[in-house]
Amino acid sequence: MTDTIYDVAIIGAGPAGLAAAEQILKYDAQVIILDEQSRPGGQIMRQPPKEFKVKDWLRGSIYTDTKNLLHRVEDHPKVNWRMSACVSGIIPLEENGHQVWFQDATGLNSLRAKKIILCSGCYERPLAFPGATTPGVMGTGAIQTFLKSQQILVGDRFVFAGTHPLQLIVAEQIIKAGGKVEAVAFAQPLSSCLAILKQPRIILSHWRVFVAAAKSIWRIKLAGVPILFGCAIKNVNEGKQLNTVILQSVNTSGKAMTNRPVRKYKVDKLGLCYGFQVSSELARQAGAKSVWSDNRGGWLISHSEWMESSLAGLFVAGELTGMAGADASREEGYIAGIGCLLSLRLMSHDVAEQTTRQARRKLKKHNNFAQALAQLSKLPVHLLETVMTGNSLLCRCENITCGTVKKALENNPHSLSANSIKLLTRTGMGLCQGRLCYANTASLIAITRNRRIEDIGPYHAQWPAKPILISSILKKRQQ
C-alpha cells in the first residue's frame, strides 16, 4: 500500500470522473484517477491507442464539450494516473477515509484516500434467447467500441435488434465504414418511439441529439436498410459462428404474433441493444444504499444533493446514479467534485452553492431528456417471457438455462429473492459475478412469483467486486 494519502481518489475516467477531477485540481488537492482502460475518456470517448492517429476522430458537435474536457484533464500536470487498473474493492477506514484495492500489471495494490468519487459507468443489458452465446452475437456498444478505438469493422453483414436508439447511430457508422446492414429492428411499436415528439421542450433543449438521430435515419434509409418496429429477436443458429438471425413480430406488449411470418437474415454479426445496466457493484460492496429503477438502469446508488452516498466520504456520479448520458454525467461529476471540496473544507458552502447553480440547471434538463429516452426505449412488458425460452442460456459463466431456474422456482416455492435462487442454482457465482445474468434472473423470478424486482433484491455484492488472480492475493499476503 502506498504511504501517500490522497485527498480524492476518482474511480472511472469518463466524463463524470474527468469533470470532478478538473474542479478538485483547481484547489491543489492531491487527486488520483483509476480506470480499467489504457487511456481516459470512458465508453463515450474510447480513445484510440497513442500509437494510432485517427483522422476526424469522433466528429460532431455532440462530442465537442466532452472532448475538450478530456484534453484539459489528460494534459494536466498534477493528475496522478493509474490506468489499466481494475478496482476490486473499497473499504471504509476508521481514520483517513477509505482504502481502495485494485489490480494492475504490477499485481494487487491498494491506496488510501480521504474521499472517493465513484464513476463506474454502465454496461449493456444482456438478453437470454436461443443461441445468444453463438460467436458473432455482440452488444451494439461493443461493435461501436471497435470502430471508435481501433477503427475495426468486426464483420461484413449486420443485423441490429433492440429497443434503444443507439442502434441507429451504430448502424449508420457501420454503413459509413463499409459494412452491410441488413436490418435495424425495434421491439417496441413505432408509436412508442414517436411519443417523444409530443414533448417540444425536450426537443428544443436537445435539438442536436434529434438532428443527429434524424441524419442517421436518413442515411440508413438511403442505404436501403429497413427499420422495423414491433420486431424482436427470436433465435440465432448455434455453433462456432453466427450465420443466421431470425426475428419475430411482437405486439405492443411484447407477445409473439405467431400468425405472422418470421424474418430470416444471413449475417455474420448481430448487434443487441436492449438497454443498459449501471455498474453499482463497487458502491454496494462498500456499503452504499441503492434503489431499484427499471427504466434508469437497475440498482442505482442513492445520494445527497452533493452526490455523497449513504456511506460518508463516498461520492458517486455518472450513470450509476441513473442512466442519463455523457452530458448529465459531466454535470454530476462537476457537482461531486465541488461536494468533495466542501467536505474537505477547501470551499465554503456559499461558494459551493453559487458555483453549482448552473450545473444543477443543466443536470435537470439532461435528466428530463433521460427520462423521456428511458420511456421510449423500455422493454415491452411481456418481451422477456417471449424471448427467454426454457433452453435459453441464462447464466453463461455457470452454464445455467432459463429452464433450470424455472425448475428451481417450481421446486422451492418459498424462494423469493435473487440471492436464494443464486444459492440454489449458482446463477451469478461465475467470473462476471452476476453482471450478465442478474437482470434476466431477477425478471424471471418477478414474472414467476408476481413480485416487484425491488422486493427480490440484488445479488449480494462482495469483495472482490471483479475477478483478481489468487496468486496476486497470496503475493500481497507474503509482502
Image (cartoon, grey):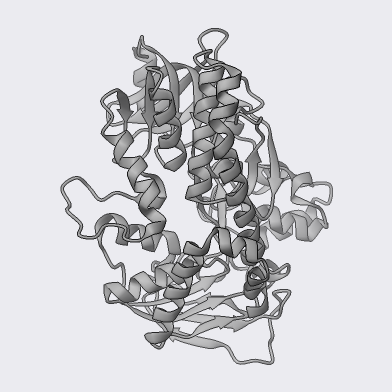
Q: 192 or 133, which is in the foreground? A: 192
Q: Is residue 34 visible?
A: yes
Give the x, y percent position of residue 194. Answer: 63, 75
Q: 341 or 190, which is in the foreground? A: 341
Quarter holding the C terminus is: top left
Q: Looking at the rendering, which quadrant does residue 128 occupy?
A: bottom right
Residue lying at 51% horizontally and 67% vertically, measured from the top left = 210
Where 393 falls versus 220 (above or below)?
A: above
Q: Is residue 472 left or right of residue 336?
A: left
Q: Is residue 404 left or right of residue 264?
A: right
Residue lying at 59% horizontally and 39% vertically, measured from the top left = 360
Q: 288 or 328, which is in the foreground? A: 328
Give the x, y percent position of residue 265. Answer: 44, 85
Q: Is residue 454 left or right of residue 283?
A: right
Q: Is residue 12 visible?
A: no
Q: Looking at the rendering, which quadrant does residue 478 occupy?
A: top left
Give the x, y percent position of residue 137. Answer: 43, 67
